[in-house]
Structures are given as C-alpha cells and as structure tokens.
Image (cartoon, rainbow, N blue to C red):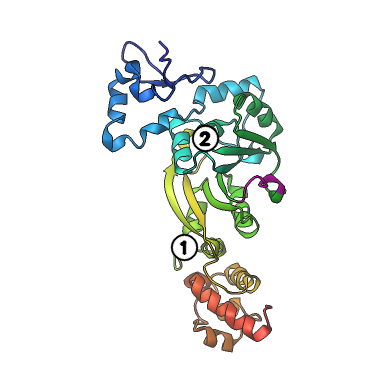
Amino acid sequence: MQCAGCTLWCDARGEEPRQRPLDCVFKCDDALDARQCRNCLAHAALRRALRPRQRADSSRAHLVTLTRSQTSELLTRHGLAPRRSFGQNFVVEPETVRRIATLARVSQGDHVLEIGAGLGALTLALSDTGAQVTALEIDSGLVAALHETLAGRANVRLVHDDAMRVEWSQLLAAADSWTVVANLPYNVATPLVADLLDFVPQVRRLLVMVQKEVAQRFVAAPRTEAFGALSVKVSYWATARIVGEVSSAVFLPRPRVASSLVEIERRAQPAVTSDRDVLFGLVRQGFATRRKMLRRALDGAVMADDFARAGVNPEARAEELSLTEWARLADAVASRTGGTT
C-alpha cells in the first residue's frame, strides 16, 4: 500500500521501504513527515535509520531520484542508448545519487550548476534540496527526456549546451556564487575543471565525480606519482580532497574503472602571488619532461642564477617541487625578465 504521508512505499508484509514513483505526489506537511508516518515506522529498517547516531543521514530518503528500472524505461521510451562519444554512464543506484546530493551541501537559496544532467537522476535530488538548479546537457536526445523527468520542477532551469563551449558569464548571470556538481567523463574532466578554476570565478565550489586516477591527480601532493601540472594548478586556486569512492556497479553501462568524488573549494585569494603566466608557463614546461632534472627541463627559461635566488635545486625533478617552490622560481625569473618566460 502507498504511504500517503511520505516519499516511500510500504508493504504490510514487512518488505523494505521502496522509493515512490515519480508521479506520486509528495503530500507531507510540517506536521506529518516521513519520520512520523506510522506505516513507514512499522519497518524495522526505517526505525534503525532514525536512531540518533544516524538521524543526520535519514534526510537522504526525501531526495527523489531515478531507479535503475526507471532509467531503463526512460531510455527505451525515448529511443536512447548511452553514447560512448559523450562518455555517458548513468548512475542508477538511488542511494549513491542521494549521497552525492548530500555531499554537495546545498540548500534553499543556493545556486547549483549540474554539468551533464543525463536523464535527471541527480537533478531531481538537487532540486529537492531547495536550491536553484541549472542543468546543463549537451545531448539533444537526453534533453527531450529531461523535459519529462523535470516537469513541474520550478527551481530547475534546463540548458542545452556544451560545457566546453558555453558562455559562462551568460549562463551564471543569476548569481555571483555557484556550486558545480558533475559526473565528468575522463576526456572532459581535466580541461573543464582547469577552465572553471582559471576563468570562472563565480564557481566557488565543485563536487565532481571522476575516474579515480584523475581524482588522485586533483589532490596529489609533491613527490608522489600522481603529482603533476594539474595538481599545481588546483592547489594554486583551491583546496581539494577526495570525499568518497564510487563503485563501477552503480552505473549503466558499467565502466571498467572505479570513480571518486572530489570536493574542490576555491580560495578567497590564490595561494601564492607570483605572476600567473610565468608560474604556469614554467610548470607546463617542467612537467612536459617530468623525468628530466629541472636544469634540463627548464633550459632556456630558467638560468642558473634563477635557481640560486629561488633556493631551488636545479637537479630536482618537476614532481619534487611544491607550489611554494614553483612560485619562488617564477618570481626569480620574473624579476630578471620583467614578467616573461
């Protein structure tokens, strides 16, 4: 039987609560929510979820999303299939979607940009937080399906465009502070995140799901295998940390690699004050031949005196330098050249 006061369906025989269908109208009010619903409370599983130590997580149950079967039905009804050229892998495990929406830490009044809305599973959950959601999707077939999924969602704006080509100032004109939430394919993740950090200051926070190896590059520290030019750029603009791992089993189709959730929080000011063009020019050149010693990798751009003034060992390799050391080297070069490399 349907439990009219909540977002769950109950069964008198004691089955686990199940998510309500999308067309089931949410009828709760302030006086009657899912935790007060007698039918739902009859389930031991839900009672355990409401114990004090877990109560903070129980709100996830209110975030509507798509199940695996609903995802398959939508694809079939619209004559769609995941497109490898767009790196499409849909998250079809509701609890994973709710977890992502919760980690986004958005609520009423916040502005959220979801890049790659897909069929709208995460869009629905983000919408239920009360935030103003802009859902960006490149695939025209999925846009048609999204109109169905998101019907009646007054706090969702659907935009058909390419995140690698969109005019950011127009897209984000509604507010000066945005959170980006995205499930990014491998071939887009690095350039897109770098562009957002470099050119879109309105984006203050990002929660991105990316291939595990890419996530490790976002957060890597010096003297580690994953540390590279991207790591330096991220640490210049922001702080980054891995906040969760995502199994390949929750996707349709199932990818061959595991994924991680990375939270990137923009700093109020860049971590160092060096000339950005000089700094990133040296970093790119240094990591282009990362196994070479810096005196060879940076030949022509950095002189022996520059290494000495910066206190940087010319026989070190690119991955051994911290952002602060790269900045000292950039300052030494800029003082000699007037800001050019």
Q: Quadrant of the C terminus?
A: bottom right
Q: Is residue 77 magenta?
A: no
Quarter assignment of residue 190: bottom right
Viewer-nearest residue: 184 or 154: 154
Sequence-earlier tag: 2 or 1? 2
**Looking at numbered disc 2 in the image, what kind of residue is underneath it?**
Gly
- The label number, if any, that marks residue 142 in the structure image: none
Around disc 1, counting alpha carbons within 10 Å, would you say few (fewer than 14), some (14 to 19), or many (20 or more)? few
- Secondary structure mostly seen in the magenta stretch: loop
Q: Residue drawn at (41%, 33%), measured in percent from left and top? A: 60
- Res 293 visible: no
Q: Residue drawn at (56%, 73%), measured in percent from left and top? A: 273
Q: Quadrant of the N terminus?
A: top left
Viewer-nearest residue: 4 or 327: 4
Quarter assignment of residue 138: top right
First to last magenta residue range: 170-176
**Which percent across, then down, holds residue 223?**
44, 68
Above or below for 326 versus 19: below
- Res 175 visible: yes
Viewer-nearest residue: 50 or 98: 50
**Looking at numbered disc 1 in the image, what kind of residue is underneath it?**
Glu
Above or below for 208 versus 51: below
- The label number, if any, that marks residue 130 in the structure image: 2
Q: Is residue 162 left or right of residue 244?
A: right
Write down the residue under mark 1. 225
Element at badge 2? Answer: loop
Q: Residue drawn at (65%, 58%), measured in percent from left and top? A: 199
